[in-house]
Image (cartoon, grey):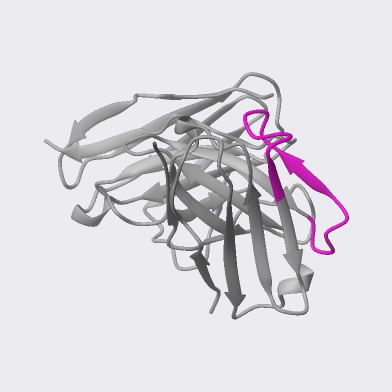
Amino acid sequence: QVKLVESGGGVVQPGGSLTLSCAASGFIFNYFGMHWVRQAPGKGLEWVAFISYDGSKTYYADSVEGRFTISRDNSKNILYLQMNVLRPEDRGLFYCAKGGRLETSNIDSWGQGNLVTVSS
Amino acid sequence: AIRMTQSPSSFSASTGDRITITCRASQGIGSYLAWYQQKPGKAPQLLIYAASTLQSGVPSRFSGSGSGTDFTLTISCLQSEDFASYYCQQYYSYPFTFGPGSKVDIK
């Protein structure tokens, strides 16, 4: 079955950088688009970024555009989220999520999340 | 960006109740609407996609309807394991957006 395991989270100072990784298994990784979704403590879900199955297309939430970069390594079945110029409001649980073949496909599977804390 | 709203934001219900959660999009999204359930400390899980298609393995007491801008999630006979938060999400266009969530707790 689909398995998504995030890693790389931790504590970082405002203005700092962090890279999250998501190891995927149980499905043909290079066939599906992938997303990052975050959730601030006690708050709702916020979609962050998408990358197409081949990496040729990416989309971002306005709140992270220009600061975050989503990428993937289809040879290793790994999804990444490079986060720069982190702000306190970026803190939260970051979920890796599997989309469909098409860009406008729903998310159907989620990882367990990885916590990012931005604090001095 | 398409704005999603949900109502109610929270409410109490009893086991066996029939409940309905409403989701509204700020513009038409066809049937590009999914519903997710999230329990405390857990990742969300897909319940319904394409507004009304039940995800494999999801109990038939869950159902979805609607198209365009107005959608509903119905749980026909609430079970103890259904007390959770529910989110709608549009995937019609980027940026994808979620509703603020509806929390169902025990009366």
Q: Quadrant of the N terminus of chain B?
A: top right
| Residue drawn at the location 19% of the way across and 54% of the way down | B80
Q: List x then y, in percent, for residue B57.
A: 45, 68
| Residue drawn at the location 78% of the way across and 70% of the way down | A31
Q: Which residues are magenta?
A: A52-69
Q: Is residue A65 above or below residue B8?
A: below
B47 or A2: nearer the viewer = A2
- In the rendered picture of this protein, how many numbered marks are placed on residues? 0
A44 or B50: nearer the viewer = A44
**Quarter where residue A39 is shown:** top left
Q: Residue furthest right?
A: A56
Q: Does the segment drawn in magenta span residue A60?
A: yes
Q: Residue furthest top?
A: B26
**Quarter where residue A55 is shown:** bottom right
Is any atom of residue A32 visible in this view?
no
Q: Quadrant of the C terminus of chain B?
A: top left
| Residue drawn at the location 66% of the way across and 71% of the way down | A78
A61 or B92: nearer the viewer = A61
Q: List x then y, in percent, for residue B87.
A: 45, 39
Q: List x then y, in percent, for residue A105.
A: 71, 51
A66 or B21: nearer the viewer = A66
**Quarter where residue B90 is shown:** top right
Q: Is residue A1 above or below residue B11?
A: below
Q: List x then y, in percent, for residue A89.
A: 47, 30
Image side of residue A68 versus residue B20, left or right: right
| Residue drawn at the location 64% of the way across and 54% of the way down | A81
Q: Does the segment drawn in magenta span residue A18?
A: no
Image side of residue B1 versus residue A103, left or right: left
Is any atom of residue B40 visible in this view?
yes
Q: Main secondary structure of the magenta part?
A: loop
